[in-house]
Image (spheres, rainbow, N blue to C red):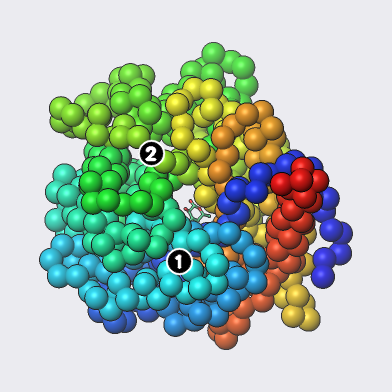
Amino acid sequence: MMMNEPIDPPHHFPPGFVWGVATSSFQIEGGAAEDGKGESIWDRFCRNPGAIADGSDGDIACDHFHRWREDLDLIAQLGVDAYRFSISWPRVRPGGAGAWNARGLDFYERLVDGLLERGVKPYVTLNHWDLPAELQDSGGWAHRDTVHRFVEYALGVHERLGDRVAAITTHNEPWVIATLGHETGVFAPGVKSRAIAAQVSHHLLLSHGLALQALRAAGCKSQLGIVLNLSPIHPATASAADLARARLEDGRGLRWYLDPLFKAVYPPDVLDFLGADAPRVEPGDLQTIATPMDFLGINYYSRTVVSADTPWDTARGGMAVTEMGWEIYPDGLTELLLRLHHDYAVPPLYVKENGGAFKDQVIDGQVHDADRVAYIASHISAVGDALAQGVNMAGYMVWSLLDNFEWASGYEKRFGIVHVDYPTQRRTMKDSAHWYRAFLQRQRAKNATATVSKGV
Ligand code: FCB
């Protein structure tokens, strides 16, 4: 067990608050070509020399495709309320259009039923980046037709699973897909064009709105929303140039997504900045994007400090950093949640991802990841601070259940609260998993006592 048990965050989290753990399909499943799965843009991207730090790919990953029962047992042992996972679009509809792959849908059906049998609520993400490669061949997210393929995909998943899943997220982190996938090109599909990136972001948002409308029209009862990666932007100094740059980056990273989703407009300062690279927006698109959601998910890892000469930097704030080089700054999460609460008419908020990569060592079958425990506890506390100030918080999920394929960093960065020894695929609960489990037990006990003392 743990050496220095950290003090639990002192806050009160109401009984209905949803505690969970999260993963995504490409990062854990493996089974890259099994049971009729098609190729995704990440399968392809991994083959580009130099694209992935350790030259690895997702062919086997955590072998979750075969070991899902064992993984569901781990989730059940943690005592979480919910498990957030994503569906691999090319596993269920290999070419992104045309024939469906029943065996792929069967896999997710087994997963969903397995969660329900264990008393865990399934939280499904439709697009955690692994677009079918064939759709990329016809333009991918830059092509407006992909929007309609996504709506079909959403409806197909709903038809099979919609009666049993608690929540459906359309997209995970559209900023990452647009900017890292299409502007800087460090993620799949590796395109480098600011204009294409802007068009991609618009199509992602549009497909989100259209999918929500189509799912509701089909009678979907699951909660519907999107997950954004939001990092508060702080100017490095109070100089006019740094402040101006910070405002622009806030526009590009946060308001570019929040304003259309909640106000049906793109921020004018970012449109000015993009000039001829601004996306083509058809009449009615923005109203579609602003279709009301049941929840907004936020992935929070760090703040970003910017200056006129060094726009993006998650490591320069001066606090300790994780193995990703991301500054550990829990106050940024409270700041962000309060801002969303004050500036936008947001639905209930979830932290859908939060966690840290640290250097882990297995010693005598144990992993003493005190840094990760401290990271998670301090961020839960930051959520508690927001809750105490009136923010409508619905839940918190740790990234990640398992160590996994961390995109361009390959397997070198470990985010799991469960350690994975890749050669043997052995899973070992780290101290952080033990702590999370015990913390959740203490939360439930507190809520039970409160209920009894109220005589309810
Ligand atoms: C987020 C991704 C997730 C994981 C974490 C560390 O951007 O959504 O898949 O890689 O970062």
Residue sitting farthest toward the front: 455
* Residue at image point 38% right, 28% down: 262
Query: Which of 399 and 232 lies nearest the eye of the viewer?
Result: 399
Q: Report the residue marked by disc 2.
A: 293
Whole-percent x, y for residue 253 in the image: 44, 34
Kindly identify the amino acid type of the residue bearing the numbered disc 2: Met
In the figure, is residue 123 to the left or right of 220?
right
Quadrant position of residue 188: bottom left
CB within 8 Å, label 1 to label 2: no
Kindly identify the amino acid type of the residue bearing the numbered disc 1: Gln
Whole-percent x, y for residue 378 in the image: 72, 45
Q: Is residue 49 visible?
A: no
Q: Could you classify mark 1 by the number of other residues whose Cα lies within 10 Å: few (under 14), some (14-19), or many (20 or more)?
A: many
Query: Which of 56 and 6 lies nearest the eye of the viewer?
Result: 6
Q: Report the residue marked by disc 1.
A: 27
In the figure, is residue 30 to the left or right of 442?
left
